Image (cartoon, coloured by chain):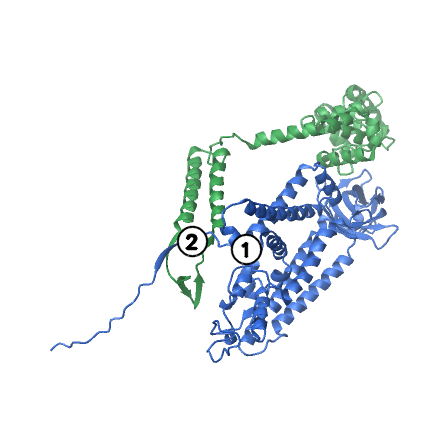
């Protein structure tokens, strides 16, 4: 006898299999404007930076522009300090410190830089504001883009792009103004008499600002910026991140005003999607931490405004840490953060000290090598040296050259030289010694240049004195 | 390049471009179940999202491929193919040199018109001269132009070939070849010693009077033709002054007799091809100014 079993046949609906194009036009993001606590903070971080950027080149110092990176002259002026190309290691050090400070802040509170001070954010906010003023609110903009072309639409688009280009032009011109005196630049632009390079770079930065802040916007944050990608390396469970509290919010769902959500089995989230509408990178923060989130806190402000209307407590979306979301408390003082801050303070201290103890005098000594030594008719030995002296100070000085290391050696040639501020001088001199007074074929000597009117202004450089074997 | 290597380069380049283009387009379409967002792989519990690349990125790839192909048609790059524009580095260099010459012509003409004495007294022009000297002359004459064994001191008043601005300029333009013949074969050891003694006596240095007298005979036979009857030299022939205590090849007795024995053929290179006429003019003035 055969067993007849009834086999349950499950009806499986086949999952939809579709072909997708892996290069896709991104969907345009229409952000909704929102007011709130964190947006006000951004006014206090963004505006000083903006004003600083636009106004700094117009300041004067000692008859020149206060902040000017004079590339042809190879002098970089920042207020009272002038840096030469030889000071490039200081710039490298400064950049390292800046990067390190960024990492420290990231460990503490995530992407504060992105949300509150990054130029991309600041300029995109300006452009978004202009867009709101010319094309209207979010819904109006969506409607406008769907509408057929008309005179009204063309006028609005023209106004928007015109205002964008105008701000971009001011930005580009100011940027060039850090490298070329901005008063001259403004005058030349107004009279159409700029040099080729000035107008080329102004146009370049205008276009770059216009494209980045007007068209690219979140594409820069999502695809171009490396910070987005390595942020997760720096976060730990106590880092403050913008996060939705699923414990509190789920199940999400709409409900009547005044109804008790717990009775309906719902959480505090009413699924209004306001947090999605305000997000400049177009994500849904309720899905958790994502690399696109720039920490601008627009969703926090949006959700808080809705919570207020619903009479629920604020903070459904807030700056919180993983630790806190799991029910614990955020550990502020943890080894990682303490170590970061300590190293940062040390680096800043060393850097500040280096800047303020810079000696604006450089000296290099090159010994003639084609003739290792020269024998005089009297049988003494001469070595020929070229001394490269750079007076990087703001005023003229007289310098005296001296030499130590050869007790019975003497300098043949002038030892007093007057150098203007910024002057580079090459001077040649000989050092003469009797071979009997030297123990070895090669003796280490040190040249020193000391300012006669300011003895603290001195530099030294090593060299060698050679005699025949 | 030989035609083999040219062909190899062309093959590799075109294959790479074709490969890149293929990779770009082959990855376009992907089968994806609805709701799935990952690549499907899992590494230690970590999954990988498979999001679409934005179209602007794709277009940038495409534009660079088109640009690359256009570049290789127009400029050299595909093996020995010179490119439709026929651009070469040498031609670009020549064009840039010509443009620079044109740009600096006015300045050069201004310097050439100045007399040597005026240039020698102008601090800025002296600096130019010092830099030209440092790049072209210091290797032999020393960084301070005071010379060494075999290379004259340019800062003193002793000029082997003449110290007037014209003579200095002629030295720079054409170079110099000294021609002191060797006298060992003709004079022999005794004659060399005697002549050396006489030369020393011309400088007021101690020598044996008998040798000096014999040396004087040799000197008037063989040496006066170039070095002059009194031994003060002849700049037209490049024969040094033997009486002023300045010795190009050393002034000890051994060194002087060595010069007599083997002769001397010092060479100063010609700088006509290396330095432009305004540079030679400034350099002449600088050298002249070292001792004037």
Label 2 lies in what chain?
A
> Which is nearer the eye, A357 or A370?
A357
- Let me know if marks 1 and 2 both belong to one chain: yes
**Which quadrant of the rendered structure holds the C terminus of chain B?**
top right
Left or right position of A135 against A367: left
Q: Nearer the viewer, mark 1 or mark 2?
A: 1
Decide: few, some or many residues near mark 1? Use Cα within 10 Å; few <14, some 14-19, many ≥20. Answer: few
Whether residue B131 can be seen here? yes
The residue positioned 74% from the left and 27% from the top of the image is: B106
Coordinates of residue A204 in the picture (x, y in percent): 62, 44
Hey, which residue is sitting farthest bottom in the picture? A263
Which is more toward the observer, B64 or B117? Answer: B64
Q: Is residue B157 left or right of residue A235?
A: right
Q: Nearer the viewer, residue B78 or A372?
A: B78
Residue at the spot 42% in from the left edge and 65% down from the top edge: B43
Q: Against A117, is B78 above or below? A: above
What residue is shown with label 2?
Answer: A22
Q: Colour of chain A?
A: blue
- x and y, in percent, of residue B59 in the image: 48, 46
Residue at the farthest left position: A1
* Whole-percent x, y for residue A320 in the image: 58, 72
The number of callouts visible is 2
Secondary structure beneath label 2: loop
- What is the chain identity of the residue bearing mark 1? A
Colour assigned to chain B in the rendering is green
Residue at image mark 1: A140
Q: Residue A351: name its quadrant.
A: bottom right
Dot 1 lies on which element?
Answer: helix
């Amino acid at each position: 006898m055969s067993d007849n079993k009834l086999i349950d046949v499950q009806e499986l609906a086949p999952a939809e299999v579709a072909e997708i194009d892996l290069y896709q036009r991104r969907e345009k993001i229409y952000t909704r404007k929102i007011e709130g606590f964190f947006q006000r903070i951004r006014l206090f971080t963004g505006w000083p930076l903006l004003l600083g950027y636009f106004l700094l080149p117009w300041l004067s110092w000692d008859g020149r522009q206060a902040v000017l990176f004079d590339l042809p002259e190879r002098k970089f002026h920042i207020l009272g300090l002038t840096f030469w190309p030889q000071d490039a290691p200081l710039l490298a050090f400064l950049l390292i410190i800046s990067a390190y400070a960024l990492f420290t802040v990231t460990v503490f509170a995530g992407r504060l830089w992105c949300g509150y001070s990054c130029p991309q954010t600041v300029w995109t906010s300006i452009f978004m504001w202009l867009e709101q003023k010319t094309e209207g609110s979010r819904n109006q903009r969506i409607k406008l883009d769907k509408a057929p072309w008309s005179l009204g639409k063309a006028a609005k688009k023209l106004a928007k792009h015109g205002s964008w280009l105008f701000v971009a032009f001011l930005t580009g011109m100011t940027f060039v103004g850090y490298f070329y005196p901005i008063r001259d630049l403004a005058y030349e632009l107004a009279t159409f008499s700029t040099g080729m390079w000035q107008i080329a770079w102004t146009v370049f930065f205008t276009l770059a600002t216009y494209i980045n802040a007007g068209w690219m916007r979140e594409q820069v944050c999502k695809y171009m910026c490396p910070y987005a990608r390595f942020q997760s390396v720096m976060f730990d469970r106590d880092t403050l991140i913008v996060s939705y509290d699923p414990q509190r919010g789920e199940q999400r769902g709409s409900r009547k005003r005044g109804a008790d959500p717990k009775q309906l089995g719902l959480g505090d989230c009413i699924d209004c999607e306001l947090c999605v509408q305000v997000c400049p990178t177009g994500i849904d923060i309720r899905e958790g931490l994502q690399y696109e989130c720039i920490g601008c806190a627009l969703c926090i402000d949006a959700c808080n405004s809705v919570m207020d209307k619903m009479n629920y407590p604020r903070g459904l979306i807030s700056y919180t840490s993983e630790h806190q979301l799991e029910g614990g408390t955020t550990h502020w003082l943890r080894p990682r953060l303490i170590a970061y801050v300590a190293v940062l303070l040390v680096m800043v201290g060393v850097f500040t000290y280096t800047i303020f103890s810079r000696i604006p005098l450089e000296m290099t000594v090159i010994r003639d090598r084609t003739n290792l030594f020269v024998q005089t008719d009297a049988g003494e030995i001469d070595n020929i040296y070229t001394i490269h002296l750079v007076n990087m100070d703001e005023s003229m000085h007289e310098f005296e050259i001296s030499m130590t290391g050869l007790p019975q050696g003497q300098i043949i040639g002038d030892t007093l030289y007057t150098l203007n501020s910024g002057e580079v001088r090459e001077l040649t001199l000989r050092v003469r010694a009797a071979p009997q007074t030297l123990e070895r074929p090669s003796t280490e000597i040190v040249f020193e240049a000391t300012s006669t009117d300011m003895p603290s202004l001195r530099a030294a450089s090593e060299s060698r004195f050679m005699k025949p074997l | 390049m030989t035609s083999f290597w040219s062909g190899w380069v062309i093959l590799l380049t075109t294959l790479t471009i074709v490969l890149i283009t293929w990779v770009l387009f082959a990855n376009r379409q992907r089968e994806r179940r609805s709701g799935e967002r990952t690549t499907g792989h899992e590494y230690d519990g970590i999954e990988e999202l498979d999001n679409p690349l934005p179209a602007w990125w794709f277009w940038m790839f495409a534009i660079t491929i088109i640009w690359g192909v256009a570049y290789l048609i127009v400029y050299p790059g595909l093996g020995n193919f010179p490119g439709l524009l026929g651009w070469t580095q040498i031609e670009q260099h020549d064009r840039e040199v010509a443009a620079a010459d044109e740009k600096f012509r006015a300045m050069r003409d201004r310097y050439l018109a100045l007399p040597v004495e005026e240039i020698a007294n102008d601090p800025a022009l002296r600096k130019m001269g010092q830099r030209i000297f440092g790049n072209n002359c210091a290797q032999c004459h020393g960084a301070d132009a005071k010379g060494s064994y075999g290379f004259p001191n340019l800062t003193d008043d002793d000029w082997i070939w003449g110290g007037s601005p014209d003579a200095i300029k002629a030295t720079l333009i054409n170079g110099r070849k000294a021609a002191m013949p060797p006298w060992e074969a003709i004079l022999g050891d005794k004659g060399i010693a005697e002549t050396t003694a006489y030369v020393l006596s011309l400088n007021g240095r101690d020598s044996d009077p008998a040798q000096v007298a014999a040396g004087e005979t040799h000197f008037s036979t063989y040496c006066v033709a170039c070095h002059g009857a009194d031994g003060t030299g002849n700049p037209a022939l490049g024969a040094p002054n033997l009486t002023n205590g300045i010795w190009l090849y050393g002034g000890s007795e051994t060194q002087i007799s060595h010069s007599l024995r083997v002769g001397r053929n010092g060479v100063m290179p010609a700088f006509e091809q290396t330095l432009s006429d305004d540079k030679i003019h400034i350099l002449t003035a600088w050298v002249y100014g070292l001792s004037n």
